[in-house]
Image: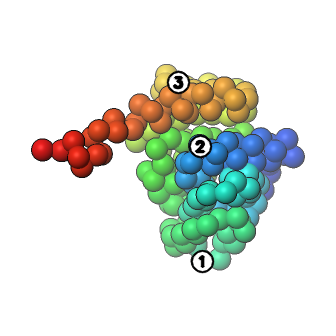
Amino acid sequence: MRAGEAASPALIKLAEELGACLAQRGWVVLSGGRDCGVMAAVSRGAAALPGHCVVGILPDDNAAAAAEVDLAISTGMGQARNVINVLASDVVVVCGPGGPGTASEAAHAIKAGKPLFLLETPAPWTEFFQSLDAHVRVFAEVDLLLTALDQAVAELSPPASANDPATQP
């Protein structure tokens, strides 16, 4: 999750790499869904892999979805849609520095008890969010982030037998 308009070329490349790596794991990639910045880049990266699923949670009917979004949900809620972005996610990744919307998503993640990962996020942000929750994780590169995401998702997933009807009484 990240503000769209101010993303640098390096951050765009990082978001594309992140999207591809998430899709490669078979995970649904959810973002603000707009056709700009990190939101478009993470969608583009995920869409490059077969079998991807990219969901965009848009603020209103006037927001253009990134072309790579498979399911665009126009909420009509404006920036309040940030709560949906967070609550619909198992984990939240902030990619780069952001604006007020990105900050609200990070705060909602902490409030909701969702694992929060900060990727290439500047010190004022990392210091602030870690002061609110010592479990906020900070990463400078995608490979290290992915290892932590794999672990977090494994901890969130029930054992396979819990979902297997054959093992139910």
* 160 up-or-down from 67: above or below: above
Identify the amino acid type marked 1. Answer: Asp
**Residue 142 in sight from this viewpoint:** yes
Q: Residues within 10 Å of mark 3 (few under 14, many from 20)?
A: few
| Upstream in sequence: badge 2 or badge 3 | 2
CA gap, disc 3 to disc 1? 36 Å
Which element is circle 3 on?
helix
Numbered disc in front, either 3 or 1: 1
- Label 1 sits on a secondary structure element that is loop
Residue annotated with mark 3: 131
- Residue 107 location (% of width, % of height): 51, 41
The amino acid type, in three-letter code, at marker 3 is Ser
Q: Which residue is mark 1?
A: 61
Residue at 73%, 51% in the rendered image: 45
Is disc 1 in contact with disc 2, using a CB cutoff of under 8 Å? no
Q: Secondary structure at mark 2?
A: loop
Relative to 77, does residue 109 appear above or below in the rendering? Answer: above
Mark number for residue 25? 2
Task: Report the number of numbered marks.
Answer: 3
> Which residue type carries mark 2?
Arg
Give the vertical position of 147 relative to 165 (above or below). Answer: above
Residue located 72% across and 39% down the image: 96
Residue 169 locus on image (x, y percent): 12, 44
CA neighbours of label 1 inside 10 A, class few (<14), some (14 to 19), many (20+): few
Crowding around mark 2 (Cα neighbors within 10 Å: few <14, some 14 to 19, many 20+) is few
Q: Nearer the viewer, mark 2 or mark 3?
A: 2
Nearer to the camera, 31 or 129:
31
